[in-house]
Image (cartoon, rainbow, N blue to C red):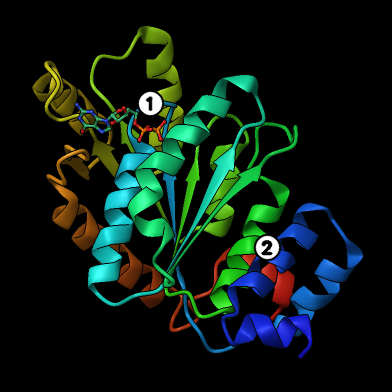
Amino acid sequence: MALADRVKVGNVRAVSRMITLLENQDPAGAAILRLLGSGSHRAAVIGITGYPGAGKSTVVAQLVAAYRRLGMKVGVLAVDVSSPVTGGALLGDRIRMQEHTLDPNVYIRSMATRGHHGGLAHATSDAALVLAAAGYDVILIETIGVGQDEVDILDVAQTVVAVVAPGLGDEIQAMKAGLLEVAHIVVLNKGDYPGAEMALRDLGEWCPLVLRTVATKGEGVPELVAAIAEHQQVTVFLAQGQSRSRHMEKRIGS
Ligand SMILES: Nc1nc2c(ncn2[C@@H]2O[C@H](COP(=O)(O)OP(=O)(O)O)[C@@H](O)[C@H]2O)c(=O)[nH]1
Ligand SMILES: [Mg+2]
């Protein structure tokens, strides 16, 4: 069977091979991507953004568990900013994702940005298309969300969740402001930290929808799942049934 066909029936090895082709910018990848088409499968693409250590991976792991309980197939794309600093973080991510790695209905992949100007790995949005074609219902994209990233994530995800934590320095406040601009939902994670109440009040002035979570304990996760679902419905409504992201429109046409 051709690679595109194997992707369409959800063959995991074919999905991985296809994403590798895209990462390597192999022309075969682009050609197969066109063959995949958008199909009829609608995937919810959700961006989870925020500075390192805020708890993105922990939130993602909780969301994976929640969507699995709903019987959904879940794909996770973790975008690694190619720096030595995040090498350790990726290892940590793997540990946080461990319980899901044996689940055949969960696909997890780290993607290196390879020095693109702070943006999403170029192939990440294409990888999301591949996962959608392979029948994944929910695609979670974890990204650090600095600089160009913010724009890119809006290009690929319908819903963007910014994860922040209490006790930030002033310089981080500025970055946070950038994150808040692109987010549809703001999560104040580490709600068990001192200063969480104050941070919650501060954030409330910036953005209408702030949820408090303690991701390590799963607190606030059902509320986050509900808020994402609500936002997804609004997105579908606005798109009048056409539930493709801007990126999908560009790649596949209508
Ligand atoms: N106390 C507390 N620790 C948390 C919470 N969420 C995550 N952490 C911890 O914070 C650290 C960074 O979390 P991680 O998910 O890797 O953050 P990321 O870099 O944004 O992906 C880990 O040691 C987590 O166990 C929380 O709600 N409360
Ligand atoms: Mg992480």
CB atoms of marks 2 and 1 within 8 Å: no
Residue 144 can be seen in this image: no
Q: Is 249 drawn above or below residue 61 in the view shown?
A: below
Residue at disc 2, secondary structure: helix
Q: Is 163 drawn above or below residue 138 in the view shown?
A: above
In the picture, which quadrant includes the N terminus?
A: bottom right
Q: Name the spot of residue 194 as percent of width and height, x first.
A: 11, 16
Q: Residue at x 58, y 55 (%)?
A: 155
Left or right of 62? Residue 240 is right
Numbered badge on residue 126: 2
Q: Residues within 10 Å of mark 2 (few under 14, many from 20)?
A: many
Amino acid carrying mark 1 in the image: Gly
Left or right of 50? Residue 6 is right
168 or 177, which is in the foreground?
168
Numbered badge on residue 53: 1
Q: Residue at x 18, y 22 (%)?
A: 199
Q: Is 221 drawn above or below residue 191 in the view shown?
A: below
